[in-house]
Amino acid sequence: MPAVIALIPARSGSKGVPHKNIRDLAGHSLLEWSIAACQQSQFIDRTIVSTDSEVYAQLSIKKGAEAPFLRPSEISGDKSSDYDFIKHALDWLRHHGYIPDYIVHIRPTTPLRDPLLIDQAIKHFMSHPKATSLRSVHPMSESAYKSLEITPEGQLSRIGSGNTDLDAVNQARQGFPMTYIANGYVDVLSTSFILNNQLIHGSYVIPFVTPIAHEVDTEEDFSYLEFQLSKYPEILSKLFP
């Protein structure tokens, strides 16, 4: 069987919501929600948290994940890339004699997940050997082809087109191609592709369509997630029986 790890990024700095990765949601921190989803996966062998905080590391270990290293401060800032922390984790693992075949990237800021969907995503990627990665997406409420931008002259134009004739965007949304947004539910990455190309996604990325997944960026987002849990309490009981 291929070796599969989950890698959860949880840096301590957050401007919008301080320490949001360990913020409580229905009695469990966001970090704990992600760890619990990974623990119920049938494919994930190890769940590793990449953090710059000793407090976060100890919390992760207490909840059953691994936190075998601390992420350096220079790759833990607002502008640090996903590639930075993934490459750092891979280098540490390789130095200790372990190279996984696949990395499942799980963001704590998208906490409401079904472990069955994580496993479906992993299986889907494994069945596409030519793919460079898998990214989860959900349909946008409005097609991006109906979006607008403001030109340097101060006019509205159809995004990416330079066309300021806006009557076309008033057509029914069914007349436009469906567009999707990456949502952070689950990404599946190829270790060999990352090491050989210094990229994490590449140019042959297959989609994995999920239900709408709400990401936490503001206080209002927490209120919305609490509302979601009040409507669908089975989400909580599935991860924390």
Image (cartoon, rainbow, N blue to C red):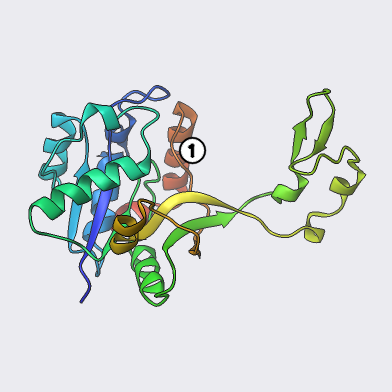
For the residue pair 101 and 199, the one nearer the viewer reads as 199
Quadrant of the rendered image containing residue 50: top left
Q: Tell me the residue at 35%/73% (across/down).
A: 126
User: Which residue lies most toward the left here?
Assistant: 96
168, above or below 218, in the image? below
Left or right: 130, with 138 as reference point: left
For the residue pair 157 and 87, the one nearer the viewer reads as 87
User: Which residue lies most toward the front here?
Assistant: 196
Q: Secondary structure at mark 1?
A: helix
Quadrant of the rendered image containing residue 100: bottom left
Left or right: 171, with 7 as reference point: right
For the residue pair 34 and 129, the one nearer the viewer reads as 129
Q: Indicate the amino acid at tag 1.
A: Tyr
* Whether residue 221 can be seen here: yes
Q: Tell me the residue at 28%/60% (across/down).
A: 191
| Residue 153 x/y as whole percent | 83, 23
Residue ID for mark 1? 224
114, above or below 128, in the image? above
Left or right: 71, with 228 as reference point: left
| Residue 217 x/y as whole percent | 45, 32
Quadrant of the rendered image containing residue 194: bottom left
Q: Tell me the residue at 39%/66% (across/down).
A: 121
Of the 4 image quadrants, the one containing the N terminus is bottom left
Q: Tell me the residue at 36%/56% (across/down).
A: 197
Of the 4 image quadrants, the one containing the C terminus is bottom left
What is the crowding at mark 1: few (fewer than 14 residues within 10 Å), some, or many (at least 20)? few
Tally the numbered discs. 1
| Residue 69 x/y as whole percent | 12, 40
For the residue pair 14 and 34, the one nearer the viewer reads as 14
| Residue 222 x/y as whole percent | 43, 34
* Whether residue 241 can be seen here: no
